[in-house]
Amino acid sequence: MKNYFCALMMGVSLVVPVATITADQPKKQSAEELRLGARVLEVLMDSHGVYETISPQKVQDLQAAAGKLTQLGLLGRMLSGDLLKKMPVFTKVTNLQIAEAVDEGTLQQLPRCFPNVETLMLTYASPLKPDSIGYLSSMAKLKGIILVDLGSKNAETFCATDETCQLIGKDFPHLTQLVVTLVSSNTIAITDAGIEALIPLTELKTLVLNPCEVSDQGLQVIGDNFPALQELTIKSKKISPTALSALSKKRPKLHVK
């Protein structure tokens, strides 16, 4: 069954099929929030990532939205590090979704512009280094990270590797949801080493690795750790039915897909 991340922006519909994502559904927005969100998208689209092109009146619109919006969906082409440096701080946004290309300058400024985000979803098809997630380490309230790779001709573009897992395990000990999904990519990078790096995430409830290169040994590590884990979606050709059966017996309350 496929779920869909949909962003409706100024009449442009972005629909990305994402297999087995179990992200919590955002709360329904009020009419005022929808209006403010649409205005933010309009202003940022017109700015082309350059703050100086935003008129004083539109800056006021952004400031008004910054104090009221609780969730926001953006396109990477709207953003830049220089733009976010000067943007008002969106103190109430807890759910942030960014699609398309996301450069490192943008990632560096996300903690300043969106300090209270609890769930962050990045849907991308452009180069990101494995350690790019480290720019988000100061987002202390982050509980959910969702990375969706749409694929690229460049085999080195996928940012979620064992190194990424090391940073997540070190910087986000209170994470409750981690989703890494490849829609189409030349690189499958998370291995048993990545699972071991995530062991500090004792509050993790949902883990999705689809696909990955985790083996029976990595599955055993999952069974021996992650005491709060409730849902596991893991797709790997290196995992045997015997190992899955053993995990089910050891963790009968764990829902495995």
Image (cartoon, grey):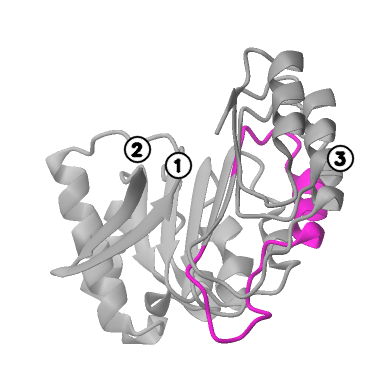
Q: Earlier in the sequence, mark 3 or mark 2?
A: 2
- Image mark count: 3
Q: Which one is in front in this view, the residue at disc 1 or the one at disc 2? A: 2
Residue at horizontal 76 percent and vertical 27 percent from the top: 226
Q: Tell me which amino acid carries mark 2.
A: Pro
Mark 3 and mark 1 in contact (Cβ < 8 Å)?
A: no
Residue 177 counted in the magenta span:
yes
Q: Earlier in the sequence, mark 1 or mark 2?
A: 2
**Mark seen at residue 224:** none
Q: Is residue 28 above or below residue 150?
A: above
Q: Tell me which amino acid carries mark 3.
A: Gln
Q: Which residues are magenta?
A: 149-178
Q: Tell me which amino acid carries mark 1.
A: Thr
| Distance of label 3 from label 2 (alpha carbons) | 35 Å
Q: Is residue 82 left or right of residue 26?
A: right
Which residue in the structure is indicated by mark 2? Answer: 26
Which residue in the structure is indicated by mark 3? Answer: 217
Is residue 55 visible from the viewing direction of this image?
no
Q: Which one is in front in this view, the residue at disc 1 or the one at disc 3? A: 3
Q: Secondary structure at mark 2?
A: loop
Residue at horizontal 67 percent and vertical 50 percent from the top: 236
Residue at horizontal 32 percent and vertical 46 percent from the top: 69
Residue 147 position, x and y percent, is: 55, 56
Residue at horizontal 83 percent and vertical 36 percent from the top: 199
Residue 189 counted in the magenta span:
no
Q: Is residue 14 left or right of residue 11?
A: right
Q: 141 or 236, which is in the foreground?
A: 236
Q: Is residue 82 above or below residue 35?
A: below
Residue 144 position, x and y percent, is: 56, 41
Q: 42 or 215, which is in the foreground?
A: 215
Which residue in the structure is indicated by mark 1? Answer: 94
Is residue 154 visible from the viewing direction of this image?
yes
